[in-house]
Amino acid sequence: MTKTFTEDDLVRFLYDELNEDERLEMKESLCADMELRSRLDELEEAKSALDAVTFKAPSDVVSRILYASKNLTVSS
């Protein structure tokens, strides 16, 4: 019986979150199903692009956040 993998399964495979049996089944399916392999390739490209993105908040924003966190009063 051939398992149908979902987008979530592919993401879990990409992030190494499948158990050993699921991983083996996924690898076998990736060898046999070029459409599934193509979708995984697209997800790998997207992951690489996300990994390359850096976010930098303006220093005045960081300063205001730090100031507010140091001067925060909690009311009961």
Image (cartoon, grey):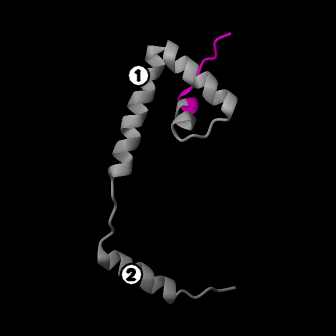
Q: Give the left or right position of residue 50, taking residue 8 as reference.
A: left
Q: Secondary structure at mark 2?
A: helix
Residue 63 is drawn in which quadrant?
bottom left
Circle 1 residues within 10 Å: few <14, some 14–19, many ≥20? few
Sequence-first disc among 2 and 1: 1
Where residue 53 appears, as percent x and y from the top left, is: 33, 53
Q: Residue at x 50, y 17 (%)?
A: 31
Q: Residue at x 68, y 9 (%)?
A: 1
Q: Give the left or right position of residue 15, taking residue 48 as reference.
A: right
Q: Which residue is mark 2?
A: 64
Q: Which mark is residue 38?
A: 1
The answer to whether residue 7 is magenta is yes
1 vs 52: above or below: above
Amino acid under disc 2: Arg
Q: How many numbered discs sit on the rendered protein?
A: 2
In the image, the segment drawn in magenta is 1-9
Where does the C terminus fall, quadrant-wise? bottom right
The main secondary structure of the magenta stretch is loop
